[in-house]
Image (cartoon, rainbow, N blue to C red):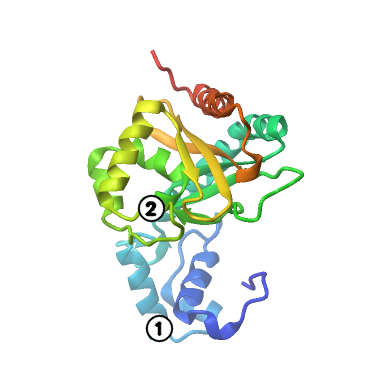
Amino acid sequence: MKRSGNFNQKYLNQSIVKAAAILDLFTFENYELGISTIAAHLEMPVSTTHRILTTLESVGYISQNSENGKYRLGLNCFILGNKVRLYNELANVAKPYLTELSQRYNETTNLSVSTGTDKILCISKINANRSFFATPNVGGTRKIQITACGKCILAYQPQAEQRHIISQIKFERYTPNTIVTEQQLWEQLEVVRRDGYAIENEEGEMGLFCCGAPFFSSGRDVCAGAVSISMPVNRVPASLDVLIADVKNTARQISRDLGYSEI
């Protein structure tokens, strides 16, 4: 299967390309395939095909039918697909509220989720008429400790998950305001949980201000992600308390539509 995009071939990992090509062969009609069929379709040696299939099986993206020896997509493909569907559903739920917040201030709004690592993932973005270059595009990631959304998401994770994520962080100084120690981060997370929002004040990019708030799913106190509004520091409104209240209210509306109850 040919893939779109103008990619420099020298930067591509051919083993991963071949693995993706194997996964692409499976359809609703052809949900099980023998190794000879797979090798023939992709014009690969059976030995190479077997090695890739075994690797994919070891990480749960391929499974083998013990009765006929044929291969099928593994459970992790289902889990991964449902994550994509979940992200799309979250983006659809959040879009009207992000749009309203963006239009109210004529600034860029974002919706981000955890990746389980030291980065967060942007899954929705509403650009203002005067967009700001530093905000991530959909599909983009940013370091969790230098973003308002990241601090919100991290603050409401179970402590074991917090420690796991923080252990992955390489504390680097990007600006004079960057959090550079684990102790500083823990202190900020306490403030976020106390106040229900986070501020990013030129911590990852000079000139960038961001205010974010967490939203929750139907499981009580389970943070599903965070929303934020970004702007240059010279456009931060004088009535900052009003901006914060509007961001928190946006997150609250998304939580409500996801079935979360504060009662």
Q: Residues within 10 Å of mark 1 (few under 14, many from 20)?
A: few
**Could you say where residue 47 lies in the image, as x and y percent from the top left?**
37, 85
Q: Residues within 10 Å of mark 2 (few under 14, many from 20)?
A: some
The one nearer the camera, 86 or 198, is 198
N-term-proximal mark, 2 vs 1:
1
In terms of image quadrants, where is residue 103?
top right
Q: Gap between marks 2 and 1, in whole Å? A: 23 Å
Residue 37 in percent (x, y) is at 49, 75
Q: Quadrant of the C terminus?
A: top left
Q: Which residue lies furthest to the right in this view?
A: 129
Q: Which mark is residue 48?
A: 1
> Can you identify the residue that label 2 sits on?
75
Q: Name above or below for residue 21 compared with residue 76.
A: below
Tell which of 176 and 65 is nearer to you: 176
Figure quadrant of residue 100: top right
Task: Decide if residue 171 is in sight here.
Answer: yes
Q: Is residue 3 placed above or below 154 in the rendered structure? A: below
- The secondary element bearing badge 2 is classed as helix
Q: In this view, does 124 lie above or below 139?
A: above
Q: Which amino acid does label 1 sit on?
A: Thr
- Kindly identify the residue that appears in the image at 39 percent across and 57 percent down: 74
Most foreground residue, 123 or 143: 143
Disc 1 secondary structure class: helix
Camera sees residue 219: no
Q: Residue at x 61, y 72 (%)?
A: 1
Residue 106 in the image: state x and y as whole percent: 72, 37
Residue type indicated by callout 2: Leu
Q: Are marks 2 and 1 in contact (CB under 8 Å)?
A: no
